[in-house]
Image: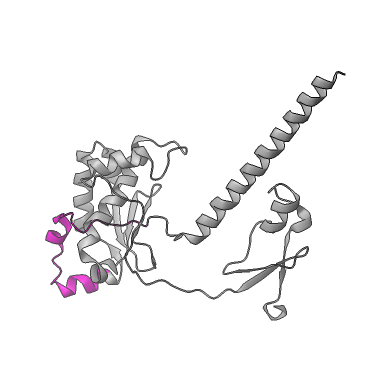
């Protein structure tokens, strides 16, 4: 084998190694960014200069009994009719026919969510007290998700991609952001289960019991190229042992 051939193979090997290390560092950076960001699925910010008054016309802020009823949760027939009209105007008859709108007091710090299977929009009742002027924008934000799913049902469709942004324009909220800055109350759940990595000893407190096999992220990234390795599988231990 010639010297030049050996040199080319060495350079190619080093190039592949550098690319793998770069990809691994990029994945670690994305995981850190995800952990720092708010985990609410449908969190979004609003422009206070935008004036949309359809929902405030349906539910005047001074109607305290109306707010109290929605704080207890349940379906909202008025919003369902309004949402059906918006979806029909956007060319989504299937979602318009099946739409359900529910005030869900269990959303915590999430302003709203959209369930594609049930064709249901969940809204946080605390919006009525903390930011009543943002209820309409929140509602339209979630309707845009349902419209996007009917138009592009592929799982490859991004949740807040260009298809969703076009749906936001159809819903009357162009330039909509995916995150919110409303100070909604959140629940701090106490961990009930504790897992430990047998290799490095790192503890992983969990609110719910793990139903699948999980391994230590740090050890897998360091010794198995980020892939699952049974050597670093998490083992459940007693909370007292911590």
Image quadrant holding the N terminus, namely top right
Can I make out residue 215 in this image? no
For the residue pair 116 and 27, the one nearer the viewer reads as: 27
Residue 161 in the image, given as x and y percentages of width and height:
38, 41
- The residue most toward the top is 2
Please tell me which residue is depicted at 24% across the width and 44% down the height of the picture: 174
Is residue 217 shown above or below 85?
Answer: below
For the residue pair 38 and 129, the one nearer the viewer reads as: 38
Is residue 153 shown above or below 100?
Answer: above
Q: Is residue 70 left or right of residue 210?
A: left
Please tell me which residue is depicted at 35% across the width and 37% down the height of the picture: 163
Q: How is the image coloured?
A: one colour
Please tell me which residue is depicted at 47% across the width and 37% down the height of the picture: 156
What are the residue bounds of the magenta stretch? 43-70
Residue 110 in the image, given as x and y percentages of width and height:
38, 62
Q: Is residue 62 magenta?
A: yes
Q: Is residue 189 left or right of residue 67?
A: right
For the residue pair 213 and 51, the one nearer the viewer reads as: 51
């Amino acid at each position: 084998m010639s010297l030049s051939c050996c040199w080319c193979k060495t350079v190619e090997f080093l190039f592949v190694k550098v690319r793998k290390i770069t990809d691994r560092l990029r994945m670690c950076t994305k995981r850190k960014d995800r952990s720092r960001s708010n985990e609410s699925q449908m969190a979004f910010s609003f422009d206070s200069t935008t004036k949309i008054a359809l929902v405030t016309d349906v539910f005047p802020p001074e109607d305290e009994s109306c707010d109290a009823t929605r704080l207890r949760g349940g379906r909202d027939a008025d919003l369902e009719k309004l949402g059906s009209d918006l979806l029909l105007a956007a060319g989504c008859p299937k979602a318009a026919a099946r739409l359900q709108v529910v005030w869900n007091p269990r959303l915590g710090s999430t302003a709203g969510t959209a369930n594609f299977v049930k064709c249901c929009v969940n809204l946080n009742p605390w919006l009525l007290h903390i930011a009543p002027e943002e209820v309409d924008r929140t509602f339209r934000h979630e309707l845009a998700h349902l419209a996007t799913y009917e138009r592009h049902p592929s799982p490859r469709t991004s949740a807040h991609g260009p298809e969703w942004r076009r749906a936001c324009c159809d819903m009357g909220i162009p330039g909509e952001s995916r995150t919110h800055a409303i100070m909604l109350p959140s629940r701090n759940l106490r961990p009930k289960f504790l897992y430990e990595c047998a290799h490095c000893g790192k503890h992983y407190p969990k609110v719910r019991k793990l139903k699948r096999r999980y391994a230590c992220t740090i050890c897998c990234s360091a010794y198995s190229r980020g892939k699952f390795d049974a050597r670093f599988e998490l083992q459940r231990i007693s909370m007292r042992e911590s």
